Image (cartoon, rainbow, N blue to C red):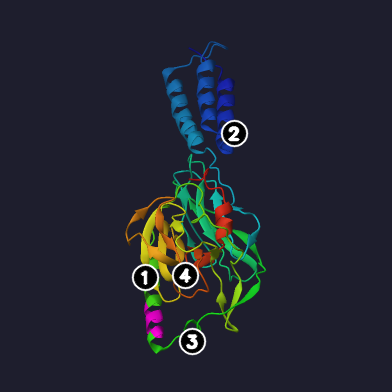
Protein backbone atom coordinates (compact mmCIF):
# COMPACT_ATOMS: atom_id res chain seq x y z
CA UNK A 1 0.00 0.00 0.00
CA UNK A 2 1.19 3.56 -0.67
CA UNK A 3 0.32 7.02 0.62
CA UNK A 4 1.15 10.56 -0.45
CA UNK A 5 3.67 12.04 2.00
CA UNK A 6 2.00 15.47 1.95
CA UNK A 7 -1.31 13.90 2.87
CA UNK A 8 0.33 12.06 5.73
CA UNK A 9 1.71 15.33 7.09
CA UNK A 10 -1.76 16.92 6.82
CA UNK A 11 -3.19 14.04 8.82
CA UNK A 12 -0.62 14.50 11.57
CA UNK A 13 -1.29 18.25 11.64
CA UNK A 14 -5.00 17.66 12.02
CA UNK A 15 -4.37 15.20 14.83
CA UNK A 16 -2.19 17.68 16.70
CA UNK A 17 -4.95 20.31 16.43
CA UNK A 18 -7.52 17.86 17.76
CA UNK A 19 -5.17 16.95 20.59
CA UNK A 20 -4.57 20.57 21.49
CA UNK A 21 -8.28 21.35 21.64
CA UNK A 22 -8.90 18.23 23.73
CA UNK A 23 -12.22 17.62 22.05
CA UNK A 24 -13.12 14.00 22.69
CA UNK A 25 -12.20 10.41 22.28
CA UNK A 26 -14.30 10.38 19.15
CA UNK A 27 -11.84 12.74 17.49
CA UNK A 28 -9.05 10.25 18.20
CA UNK A 29 -11.07 7.45 16.66
CA UNK A 30 -11.80 9.55 13.55
CA UNK A 31 -8.09 10.31 13.24
CA UNK A 32 -7.22 6.60 13.27
CA UNK A 33 -9.86 5.97 10.62
CA UNK A 34 -8.38 8.75 8.48
CA UNK A 35 -4.98 7.08 8.53
CA UNK A 36 -6.46 3.81 7.30
CA UNK A 37 -8.45 5.65 4.62
CA UNK A 38 -5.33 7.35 3.28
CA UNK A 39 -3.44 4.04 3.08
CA UNK A 40 -4.01 3.64 -0.64
CA UNK A 41 -2.23 4.28 -3.93
CA UNK A 42 -2.11 8.01 -4.76
CA UNK A 43 1.22 9.29 -6.09
CA UNK A 44 3.45 6.23 -6.25
CA UNK A 45 5.39 6.59 -2.95
CA UNK A 46 5.66 3.15 -1.33
CA UNK A 47 4.20 2.91 2.12
CA UNK A 48 6.82 0.69 3.70
CA UNK A 49 6.49 -1.24 6.91
CA UNK A 50 8.84 1.21 8.56
CA UNK A 51 6.65 4.19 7.63
CA UNK A 52 3.55 2.31 8.72
CA UNK A 53 5.18 1.57 12.08
CA UNK A 54 6.05 5.27 12.40
CA UNK A 55 2.42 6.20 11.87
CA UNK A 56 1.28 3.72 14.51
CA UNK A 57 3.78 5.11 17.02
CA UNK A 58 2.69 8.68 16.30
CA UNK A 59 -1.02 7.94 16.25
CA UNK A 60 -1.31 5.90 19.44
CA UNK A 61 -0.41 8.65 21.96
CA UNK A 62 -2.61 11.11 20.10
CA UNK A 63 -5.61 8.81 20.34
CA UNK A 64 -4.96 8.09 24.02
CA UNK A 65 -4.37 11.73 24.85
CA UNK A 66 -7.53 12.85 23.11
CA UNK A 67 -9.50 10.18 24.94
CA UNK A 68 -8.11 11.25 28.28
CA UNK A 69 -8.64 14.93 27.51
CA UNK A 70 -12.44 14.70 27.41
CA UNK A 71 -13.72 17.77 29.30
CA UNK A 72 -14.81 17.27 32.91
CA UNK A 73 -18.21 18.84 33.52
CA UNK A 74 -18.25 20.99 36.67
CA UNK A 75 -20.83 23.63 37.55
CA UNK A 76 -21.06 26.17 40.38
CA UNK A 77 -23.19 25.23 43.36
CA UNK A 78 -26.93 25.85 43.04
CA UNK A 79 -28.96 26.50 46.20
CA UNK A 80 -32.64 25.71 46.71
CA UNK A 81 -34.43 27.82 47.77
CA UNK A 82 -32.54 30.48 45.85
CA UNK A 83 -33.44 33.22 48.32
CA UNK A 84 -31.43 32.43 51.44
CA UNK A 85 -32.73 33.74 54.77
CA UNK A 86 -31.82 33.24 58.40
CA UNK A 87 -33.38 29.91 59.36
CA UNK A 88 -33.55 28.54 55.80
CA UNK A 89 -32.76 24.90 55.10
CA UNK A 90 -30.81 24.74 51.83
CA UNK A 91 -30.28 21.98 49.29
CA UNK A 92 -26.89 22.46 47.64
CA UNK A 93 -26.40 20.86 44.22
CA UNK A 94 -23.07 20.48 42.39
CA UNK A 95 -22.55 18.89 38.97
CA UNK A 96 -19.36 16.81 39.19
CA UNK A 97 -18.20 13.35 38.06
CA UNK A 98 -19.10 10.32 40.14
CA UNK A 99 -15.38 9.63 40.58
CA UNK A 100 -14.80 13.02 42.21
CA UNK A 101 -14.82 13.74 45.93
CA UNK A 102 -16.30 16.98 47.25
CA UNK A 103 -15.40 18.89 50.40
CA UNK A 104 -16.74 22.16 51.69
CA UNK A 105 -17.85 24.35 54.55
CA UNK A 106 -20.33 27.15 55.07
CA UNK A 107 -20.82 29.49 58.01
CA UNK A 108 -18.40 27.45 60.11
CA UNK A 109 -20.14 24.13 59.41
CA UNK A 110 -18.68 21.24 57.46
CA UNK A 111 -20.60 20.20 54.33
CA UNK A 112 -21.16 16.50 53.67
CA UNK A 113 -22.01 15.60 50.06
CA UNK A 114 -23.79 12.53 48.77
CA UNK A 115 -24.50 11.26 45.26
CA UNK A 116 -28.06 11.99 44.18
CA UNK A 117 -30.62 9.67 42.67
CA UNK A 118 -29.64 8.82 39.10
CA UNK A 119 -26.00 9.67 39.79
CA UNK A 120 -26.08 12.98 37.88
CA UNK A 121 -25.06 15.34 40.70
CA UNK A 122 -23.79 15.72 44.24
CA UNK A 123 -25.98 17.14 47.01
CA UNK A 124 -25.64 18.47 50.55
CA UNK A 125 -28.63 19.25 52.78
CA UNK A 126 -27.55 22.18 54.93
CA UNK A 127 -28.96 25.46 56.23
CA UNK A 128 -28.63 28.81 57.97
CA UNK A 129 -29.24 29.15 61.71
CA UNK A 130 -32.27 31.21 62.76
CA UNK A 131 -30.00 33.65 64.61
CA UNK A 132 -27.47 34.06 61.78
CA UNK A 133 -26.70 37.70 60.98
CA UNK A 134 -27.67 38.97 57.53
CA UNK A 135 -25.01 39.75 54.94
CA UNK A 136 -22.67 38.05 52.46
CA UNK A 137 -21.22 34.62 53.28
CA UNK A 138 -18.73 32.37 51.51
CA UNK A 139 -19.85 28.90 50.47
CA UNK A 140 -16.56 27.01 50.06
CA UNK A 141 -16.59 23.89 47.89
CA UNK A 142 -13.64 22.02 46.37
CA UNK A 143 -13.98 19.17 43.88
CA UNK A 144 -11.08 16.70 43.90
CA UNK A 145 -11.03 14.90 40.56
CA UNK A 146 -9.74 11.39 39.92
CA UNK A 147 -6.94 12.85 37.78
CA UNK A 148 -5.52 14.53 40.90
CA UNK A 149 -6.68 17.99 39.85
CA UNK A 150 -8.70 20.09 42.31
CA UNK A 151 -11.29 22.66 41.24
CA UNK A 152 -12.52 25.53 43.39
CA UNK A 153 -16.31 25.88 43.15
CA UNK A 154 -16.74 28.42 45.95
CA UNK A 155 -19.25 31.25 45.67
CA UNK A 156 -20.72 34.12 47.66
CA UNK A 157 -24.16 33.63 49.18
CA UNK A 158 -26.14 36.62 50.44
CA UNK A 159 -28.12 35.90 53.59
CA UNK A 160 -31.24 37.99 54.01
CA UNK A 161 -32.78 38.80 57.38
CA UNK A 162 -35.98 37.15 58.51
CA UNK A 163 -38.46 39.22 60.45
CA UNK A 164 -39.89 37.31 63.37
CA UNK A 165 -42.42 38.60 65.86
CA UNK A 166 -42.24 38.75 69.67
CA UNK A 167 -44.76 37.12 71.99
CA UNK A 168 -45.30 37.06 75.75
CA UNK A 169 -46.01 33.86 77.69
CA UNK A 170 -46.70 33.03 81.33
CA UNK A 171 -45.08 29.90 82.80
CA UNK A 172 -44.36 28.68 86.37
CA UNK A 173 -41.50 30.73 87.89
CA UNK A 174 -39.27 27.65 88.20
CA UNK A 175 -38.93 27.58 84.39
CA UNK A 176 -37.68 31.19 84.35
CA UNK A 177 -35.44 31.07 87.42
CA UNK A 178 -34.56 27.41 88.10
CA UNK A 179 -33.36 26.54 91.60
CA UNK A 180 -29.90 25.09 92.42
CA UNK A 181 -31.00 21.47 92.06
CA UNK A 182 -32.73 22.19 88.76
CA UNK A 183 -29.62 24.00 87.49
CA UNK A 184 -27.54 20.90 88.16
CA UNK A 185 -29.99 18.85 86.09
CA UNK A 186 -29.97 21.44 83.31
CA UNK A 187 -26.18 21.53 83.18
CA UNK A 188 -26.02 17.74 83.04
CA UNK A 189 -28.55 17.75 80.20
CA UNK A 190 -26.47 20.29 78.29
CA UNK A 191 -23.50 17.93 78.47
CA UNK A 192 -25.69 15.00 77.46
CA UNK A 193 -27.10 16.80 74.43
CA UNK A 194 -23.61 17.79 73.34
CA UNK A 195 -22.63 14.11 73.24
CA UNK A 196 -25.90 13.10 71.56
CA UNK A 197 -25.69 15.65 68.75
CA UNK A 198 -22.03 14.84 68.10
CA UNK A 199 -23.06 11.45 66.71
CA UNK A 200 -24.54 11.25 63.23
CA UNK A 201 -24.48 8.67 60.46
CA UNK A 202 -21.91 9.44 57.72
CA UNK A 203 -24.54 8.96 55.02
CA UNK A 204 -28.13 10.21 54.60
CA UNK A 205 -30.64 7.87 56.22
CA UNK A 206 -33.71 9.66 54.86
CA UNK A 207 -35.42 8.95 51.54
CA UNK A 208 -37.79 11.35 49.82
CA UNK A 209 -39.38 14.46 51.27
CA UNK A 210 -39.91 15.01 55.01
CA UNK A 211 -43.45 14.75 56.37
CA UNK A 212 -45.23 16.57 59.17
CA UNK A 213 -44.96 14.61 62.45
CA UNK A 214 -48.62 15.05 63.43
CA UNK A 215 -51.99 15.57 61.79
CA UNK A 216 -52.62 18.86 63.55
CA UNK A 217 -52.51 22.50 62.43
CA UNK A 218 -49.08 24.17 62.74
CA UNK A 219 -48.39 27.67 63.99
CA UNK A 220 -46.01 30.31 62.65
CA UNK A 221 -44.00 30.16 65.87
CA UNK A 222 -40.53 29.48 64.43
CA UNK A 223 -38.09 32.32 65.14
CA UNK A 224 -40.44 34.11 67.53
CA UNK A 225 -38.70 36.06 70.31
CA UNK A 226 -40.34 34.76 73.46
CA UNK A 227 -40.84 36.73 76.65
CA UNK A 228 -41.42 34.43 79.60
CA UNK A 229 -43.02 36.23 82.54
CA UNK A 230 -41.87 39.57 81.16
CA UNK A 231 -38.26 38.56 80.45
CA UNK A 232 -36.74 37.77 77.06
CA UNK A 233 -35.76 34.12 77.44
CA UNK A 234 -34.98 32.80 73.97
CA UNK A 235 -35.70 32.64 70.29
CA UNK A 236 -38.18 29.88 69.52
CA UNK A 237 -36.18 27.41 67.43
CA UNK A 238 -38.93 25.01 66.49
CA UNK A 239 -42.42 24.77 65.08
CA UNK A 240 -45.44 24.27 67.33
CA UNK A 241 -48.36 22.08 66.30
CA UNK A 242 -51.73 22.44 68.03
CA UNK A 243 -51.83 18.74 68.88
CA UNK A 244 -54.33 17.74 71.59
CA UNK A 245 -53.10 15.54 74.43
CA UNK A 246 -52.41 12.00 73.23
CA UNK A 247 -52.01 12.76 69.50
CA UNK A 248 -49.66 10.22 67.83
CA UNK A 249 -46.30 11.80 66.95
CA UNK A 250 -44.57 10.13 64.03
CA UNK A 251 -41.13 10.09 62.40
CA UNK A 252 -40.92 12.65 59.61
CA UNK A 253 -38.32 10.56 57.74
CA UNK A 254 -36.17 7.46 58.18
CA UNK A 255 -33.47 7.63 60.81
CA UNK A 256 -32.16 6.32 64.13
CA UNK A 257 -33.22 7.35 67.65
CA UNK A 258 -30.29 9.02 69.44
CA UNK A 259 -32.19 10.40 72.46
CA UNK A 260 -35.42 9.33 74.13
CA UNK A 261 -35.91 10.65 77.67
CA UNK A 262 -37.34 13.39 79.84
CA UNK A 263 -35.45 16.71 80.00
CA UNK A 264 -36.06 19.82 82.13
CA UNK A 265 -37.18 22.29 79.47
CA UNK A 266 -38.06 19.88 76.65
CA UNK A 267 -40.08 17.43 78.73
CA UNK A 268 -40.30 13.96 77.21
CA UNK A 269 -38.09 14.32 74.16
CA UNK A 270 -37.16 12.16 71.15
CA UNK A 271 -34.31 13.03 68.76
CA UNK A 272 -33.97 11.27 65.41
CA UNK A 273 -30.67 11.29 63.51
CA UNK A 274 -31.25 11.43 59.75
CA UNK A 275 -27.55 11.32 58.88
CA UNK A 276 -24.87 13.84 57.93
CA UNK A 277 -25.58 16.11 60.89
CA UNK A 278 -29.34 16.46 60.28
CA UNK A 279 -31.78 15.64 63.07
CA UNK A 280 -35.39 16.28 64.09
CA UNK A 281 -36.54 16.81 67.68
CA UNK A 282 -39.98 16.14 69.17
CA UNK A 283 -40.65 17.73 72.59
CA UNK A 284 -43.24 17.84 75.38
CA UNK A 285 -44.50 14.28 74.74
CA UNK A 286 -46.80 12.62 77.22
CA UNK A 287 -45.35 9.23 76.31
CA UNK A 288 -42.25 7.89 74.53
CA UNK A 289 -42.63 4.71 72.45
CA UNK A 290 -39.09 4.28 71.07
CA UNK A 291 -35.63 3.64 72.53
CA UNK A 292 -32.13 4.90 71.82
CA UNK A 293 -30.46 3.06 68.94
CA UNK A 294 -33.75 2.01 67.37
CA UNK A 295 -34.08 2.53 63.58
CA UNK A 296 -37.35 4.22 62.63
CA UNK A 297 -39.11 4.70 59.33
CA UNK A 298 -41.23 7.51 57.94
CA UNK A 299 -44.60 7.55 59.68
CA UNK A 300 -43.55 5.28 62.55
CA UNK A 301 -44.97 6.35 65.92
CA UNK A 302 -42.45 7.89 68.31
CA UNK A 303 -44.87 8.66 71.14
CA UNK A 304 -47.88 10.78 72.07
CA UNK A 305 -48.13 14.57 72.31
CA UNK A 306 -48.46 16.13 75.74
CA UNK A 307 -47.58 19.03 78.00
CA UNK A 308 -44.34 18.04 79.76
CA UNK A 309 -41.45 20.47 80.31
CA UNK A 310 -41.73 24.25 79.94
CA UNK A 311 -45.14 24.64 78.30
CA UNK A 312 -48.38 26.57 78.67
CA UNK A 313 -50.55 23.70 77.43
CA UNK A 314 -50.61 20.52 75.31
CA UNK A 315 -48.86 20.80 71.93
CA UNK A 316 -45.95 19.39 69.94
CA UNK A 317 -42.76 21.38 69.58
CA UNK A 318 -40.91 20.02 66.54
CA UNK A 319 -37.41 21.24 65.64
CA UNK A 320 -34.95 20.68 62.80
CA UNK A 321 -31.23 20.85 63.57
CA UNK A 322 -28.26 20.68 61.20
CA UNK A 323 -24.71 20.79 62.58
CA UNK A 324 -25.85 22.95 65.48
CA UNK A 325 -27.94 25.31 63.34
CA UNK A 326 -31.71 25.40 63.92
CA UNK A 327 -33.73 25.55 60.69
CA UNK A 328 -37.32 26.46 59.86
CA UNK A 329 -39.27 23.15 59.86
CA UNK A 330 -42.02 24.54 57.62
CA UNK A 331 -39.49 25.24 54.87
CA UNK A 332 -38.02 21.73 55.14
CA UNK A 333 -41.52 20.25 54.79
CA UNK A 334 -42.03 22.27 51.58
CA UNK A 335 -38.81 21.01 49.96
CA UNK A 336 -39.28 18.41 47.22
CA UNK A 337 -36.52 15.91 47.99
CA UNK A 338 -38.02 12.97 46.09
CA UNK A 339 -35.95 13.51 42.93
CA UNK A 340 -32.79 13.86 45.06
CA UNK A 341 -32.92 10.66 47.09
Q: Nearer the viewer, residue 36 or 272?
A: 272
Mark 2, residue position = 17
Tell me the quarter of the picture where residue 193 sits: bottom left
> SS class of the residue under badge 3?
loop
- At label 3, counting other C-alpha atoms closer than 10 Å, the crowd grade (few under 14, some 14-19, many 20 or more) is few
Q: Nearer the viewer, mark 2 or mark 4?
A: 4
Judged left or right of residue 251, residue 165 is: right
Alpha carbons under labels 2 and 4: distance apart: 75 Å
**Quarter-of-image position of residue 139:** bottom right
**Residue located at (62% from left, 64% from top):** 220
> Earlier along the polypeptide chain: callout 1 or callout 4?
1
Residue at the spot of label 3: 177
Whole-percent x, y for residue 149 in the image: 48, 50
Q: Is residue 308 above or below residue 28?
A: below
| 44 versus 334 height, above or below | above
Please give the residue where the numbered disc 1 appears in the rendered image.
195
Dot 2 or dot 1: first in sequence order is 2
Are the residues at dot 1 and dot 3 in contact (C-beta closer than 8 Å)?
no
Question: Could you tell me how far apart the alpha carbons at marks 4 and 3 are, in whole angstroms?
Answer: 20 Å
- Label 2 CA crowd tier, 10 Å (few <14, some 14–19, many 20+): few
Question: Alpha-carbon neighbours of circle 4 within 10 Å: few (<14), some, or many (≥20)?
Answer: many
Amino acid sequence: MVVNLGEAIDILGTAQTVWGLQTSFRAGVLFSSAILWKMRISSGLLFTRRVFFLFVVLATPVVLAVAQAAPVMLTPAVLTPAVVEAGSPELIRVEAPATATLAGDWLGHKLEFFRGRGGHAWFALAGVDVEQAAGPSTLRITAHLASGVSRNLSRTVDIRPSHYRTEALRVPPRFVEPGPDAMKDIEAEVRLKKVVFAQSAPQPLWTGSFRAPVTAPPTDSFGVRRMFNGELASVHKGMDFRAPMGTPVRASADGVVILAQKLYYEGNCVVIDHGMGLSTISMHLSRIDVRVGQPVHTGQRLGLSGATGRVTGPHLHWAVRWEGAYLDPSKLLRMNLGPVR
